[in-house]
Each structure stands twice: as C-alpha cells, then as structure tokens.
Image (cartoon, coloured by chain):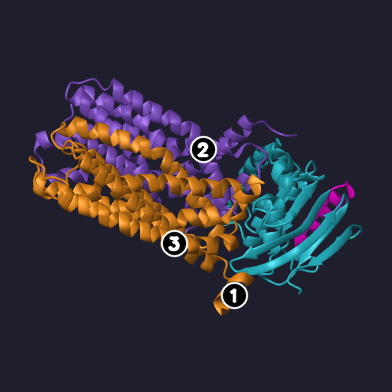
Amino acid sequence: MGGSPGAACRAVTERDLLIAARRRSDVLTTFFFFVIVVSLFPLGVGPQPDTLRQIAPGVVWVAALLAAMLSLARMFGADYADGTLEQLVLTPQPLTLLVLAKILAHWLTTGLPLVLIAPLLGLQFDLPGNALATLLWSLLIGTPALSLIGAVGAALTLGVRGGGALTALLVLPLYVPVLVFGAGAVTASATGMGAAGHLSLLAAMSLAALVFAPWAAAMALRISLE
Amino acid sequence: MLQARQIECTRGNRRLFQDLSFRLEAKQALRVGGENGSGKTSLLRMVAGLSPVEAGEILWNEARIAALGEDYRRDLLFLGHANGLKDDLTAVENLRHALALAGTEAGAAELRAALAEQGLGAVADLPVRLLSQGQKRRVALVRLGFAADKPLWILDEPFSALDAASIGRIEKVVVSHLQRGGMALFTTHQEVELAGAQVRSVELGVA
Amino acid sequence: MREMNWFKYSSPQTFYPLAGKMVPWFMGTAAVLGLVGLYIAFFAAPTDFQQGDAYRIIFIHVPAAWMSMFIYMVMAFWAGIGLAFNTRLSSMMAHALAPTGALMTFIALWTGAFWGRPTWGAWWVWDARLTSELILLFLYLGYLSLVAAIDDRRRADKASAVLALVGAINVPIIYFSVKWWNTLHQGSSISMTRAPSMASIMVAGMLVMVFAFWAYSIAAALLRVRCEIQDRERGAAWIKDLRKS
C-alpha cells in the first residue's frame, strides 16, 4: 500500500517510452523535420562553404528549437484527451516529480536523437572537428532546457484554441537565451576561442530550468484541468 | 467521512448549483442525479479536487481537501468520463501502470485474472484502441477490484456503454466495497440497484 | 485597522468608482507633463553636436522603453497576487496593464527605428536594447494571446499569471544574453545605449517624459480595468443598477 515517488516516476517514464516505441512515427517525424530544416538553409543561402560554416551553429540550433517546439503538443496533449492526465494529477505522489518524469521521457525521444544526428549535419556545413564536438555538447546540455521550458508552455495551452502556434509564441521568446549561448558556444569553438564559458552558462540555464520548470508546469497542468 | 458545505459551481455565466451540502459516511453511497449540463461532472471533479471550490468547503475527515493534498488523494479513487487508458498499450499494461501510479503493485497474472473475471480475458493483450467502447470502460473499471485500500470512490457515469450483465458485475463490486466500510459518490443515467447498501440521492438543477 | 483599509478596495465593486475618480487626475497629469516634456525635448534641449536634431527622439524612445519593462514587472506582480490570493481584481489589473505595456514596447521599437535611420543609416539595428524590446513585445503578445484563447475567465487569469511570472523571471536572463550576443557579434560600434552625454536639461526632460508616460499608463490601465469589471461582473446586481442609472 502506497508506493514511493521513485516507483511512480519510473512507471510514468516507462509508460511514455513504451508508447513512443509503439508510435515510432511521432518520434521520427520530429527527427526528420530537424534534418530537413537544416538542409533547407544551404538551398536558401547558397553553397559557399565560408557562409555555411558561419551560419551553421545558428541554423542547427534554430532547427533544434523548432523541432522541440513541434513536439511539445505531444507532451501532455494525448494524456489530456484520454483522461490519463487527470489520473496523473490525482496520483498521491508529488506532481512536480511526475511531470519531471514525463519531461525526461520527452527529451529522450525528441532531444536526444537531435543531439546524436547533429554532428553529422554539422559536417554538411563543413564545421571543423572541435566545433562539431562543441555542437554535440551544447545540444546535449541545452536540449533538456528546451524540453523543460517547453513543458510549461505545453501545459498552459492544453485544449486551447490556436494550439501549436500559440505554444510557439509563448515558448520561443523564453528559448532565446538557450539559443544565444548554444549557438554562441559552437561559433566560439569554430573561431578558436574557448566555448567553456558558454557551455557553463548553458548548463546553468538547464539546471535552473530543471529546478523551476517542472514545478511551474505542474501548476499549469492543474490550472488547465480546472 | 466526506462532507460538503454550501458549495457552488458556476460555468461560464451560469450558476449550476449553489448552497449544496451533503454528508457521506462509511458504507454509504450518494447518487448524483440531474439532467445533462446540470453540473454533475463538475460536482464530482470538485469533490475529487480537480476543480477549485468556489464557495463553501469540502471536508475529508474534518479537514479541508485543499489542505490535505496528497493524503486525500491517497484515499481516493476517481474514474471520470474518459477512461484514462492509453490507446497504444494493452489492457494489462494500462492497468499495471495505473496501479503502479496509485501505489499498488500488481503482477500481470493477477491482472489477467481480474480481466477474465470481467469477461475480458481474450482481449487482455490487445492494444486498447482495438476494443469497443464498452470493453474499454470495463477495463477501466477493473481498477475497482484493486482499490480496496481507497475508502472513497468517485465514479462519473461508471455504467455508460455497459450491457446489463456488466452492470450487474460492477454493482456487486461497488456493494462489496460499501459493505467493507467504503463510500461511493457516483452519477449515472441508468437505473442502478445497489442491493443491500444505503444509497441516497441528490438532484442537481432542480430550482 | 490597516488591514481593513488595504482590502477594502480589493473587490471590484468598491474599486470601480475609485478608479473612475482617479482617471481624470492621471490623464490630466499625463497631459501636462507630456507637454512640458515635449517642450524640453524639442525646444529647450540643445542640439547635439554629434547627432544633430535627430537624437531628440530619445526623449520618447527611452521613457517608452523603461515603461515597457516596468509595466511588465507590475503586470507580473498583480498577476502573481491574483494567483496566490485568488483575487479576481488583481488578475483584471494585470490584463488591463498588458496592452499599455505592449504599446510602450511598440513605441520604443518605432522610435528606435526613427533614431536609427538618420544616425546609423538603417531602419533596424540589432542592438541589445532594441532586440530585447522586440522579445519583450513577443512576451506581451504571448500573454495577450493566451488570455484571448482561453474561454474560461478564471483559467485565463491563472494560466496567464503563470506565464507572466515565468516571463518576468526570464526578462533579465533574456536581456543579459542578448547584450552578450550583441557585443560578441557586432562589437560596440552600434549601440543606442550610448546616447549623447547628458546635459542636465536632457536628464530633466527624460524624467518628465517618464512620469508623463507613467501617469498615462495608470490612467489607461484604470480605464481598461473598469471596462473589464463591467464585462466580468455583468451578472452582479450592482452592475445592473449602474446600467439602469
């Protein structure tokens, strides 16, 4: 009688990962969107290697932002519709931790794939080796912040008209600092300056988001279910 | 013991009900009646703690439910209109996860047996999306069999989409729960007989 | 005793007439201060030897920018109060402030462009303040869109409060990161924060304009909150009496 918060969180994450495994198309479409958007830029800007090298950090990062945003509706949307969210909110465990478990599952299925494919895309833009490594690190450290901050936006707009576009409007301004330091880190690496400062700031942001966002998202979920 | 004192509910600009009070003690069931739109679901959600109490108070064992938080939720089982099942998971998986969240460990074999008791043995390992409305409802209701540790059951239209035999089975589960000392707050459009239990009624939407 | 006075005006019914009485005073103050400020801006302040007369637009640009940030914080404050204490009027005040805040941001952006054109030759420069103002505009628009999209008024109050608070925490972070981004990429060649060194008359002029904008913002917010009270409380008896009289 009465489980532990840890067991409940594990159940939440497992369930979401199981569903993602069964609905692979959801995960893959976000992934392919990322790849396609990144590949569009050379078509729009021209193939000069110097230009591409310069815009690569920004392009990859903006594409990561957009891909993260597209996937936000899935974080709570299905649960809201089928009544699972209600059950989650009524669980006798701290909702903040359960939300964190959901965000973890979301990041594993949307953020992590981007992190893994990004160096390959960076090669398309002829980024030097150390910049590719920084690209990987910056996305690894920064995409959790995107999932965390995005969770708050997703929770606020559950079942609301305007859906994805509204969530985008709410969340993109909040993503700006992550974008600035994420892309900045890669640019710094590519131009020979150290990226340590940027990466530390990025890590600080992700940590701050880790502390505050689940709690804010839990509050927003309760408000959305009223 | 559940107590509601002078609670009210407004949706949009309509006051659905006001000055509503009731008490629910062990072994008692309260049936909430009323036409569609009279606020039955709103009332149940308010008692469950999903919607804020606009006026008055709701007390569980003499303490306000807002203050109790987790402690209240531990004593509560809420089954709403929606089944709370994930379409892509099987009935067994759905139940296992739902129970894990509620703090109850249940093995797959145990769950299959419970599903079989409700006549769902054959579909226990199919994704829920392949089940009919009535079957989905019955899967959701299997949770009742594992909720003996939760004194208060709040059920919103538990019998919807069910055939007579299934209704009979669920009625028996609810009655045993009541006889063990539990309480139930439920809404239904059907004529339901909970034989051997104290059932009171309250009607909403009557001026 | 003190507590009673504090909460007396927290009900829409008592606040409504109070707000009505305050509006003309604030509007009048705004008009007077505005005229004084504009006089200083366009006549009393000397021509800058570096930027000519075009710089005079900063007497509108800077106060508008300050007000846009200040109003956001006040809005977040009232939204937070409304969320924490479940008071309707606080949330209504936040909703009333948002459009004025967005207007200030808009004015800051446009006047920034009008300053940039003769000074730097471009209608838009990605300087730190202008870029932050742009993002602040998006934050305001997000708030207004969320309120508009949610039908249930109480849910809209609470959800927009969470958004406003999250935004308020992020505003300094956003400003810092944009500032950093700007110095990295453009160096300090283009910066609107480097206004011509201030003669005291110029400082006076800007302060007068700030207060003018402040008084205007209060008046506009009070007017708007009265409209919102009329709308939200329309079922209440006192509103019906008001309409009849």
Disc 2 versus disc 1: nearer the observer: 1
Rounded to the nearest angstrom, the CA distance separating label 3 from label 1 is 22 Å
What residue would you read off at disc 2? A214
The answer to whether residue C134 is visible is no
What residue would you read off at disc 3? C23
Specify whether residue B167 is painted magenta: yes
Q: Is residue C228 left or right of residue C40?
A: right
The x and y percentages for residue A55 are 18, 37
Q: Residue at x 62, y 65 (%)?
A: B11
The chain letter for the residue carrying disc 3 is C
Q: Nearer the viewer, residue A65 or C179?
A: C179
Q: Nearer the viewer, residue B58 or C232?
A: C232
Q: Residue at x 45, y 38 (%)?
A: A148
- The purple one among the chains is A
Q: Residue at x 51, y 41 (%)?
A: A216
The magenta stretch spans which residues? B165-187
Q: Earlier in the sequence, mark 3 or mark 1?
A: 3
Q: Is residue A195 left or right of residue B69?
A: left
Q: Are discs 2 and 3 located on one and the same chain? A: no
Q: Amino acid at mark 1?
A: Lys
Magenta stretch: dominant secondary structure = helix
Disc 3 versus disc 1: nearer the observer: 3
Helix, strand or loop status at disc 2:
helix
- The cyan one among the chains is B
What residue would you read off at disc 1? C240
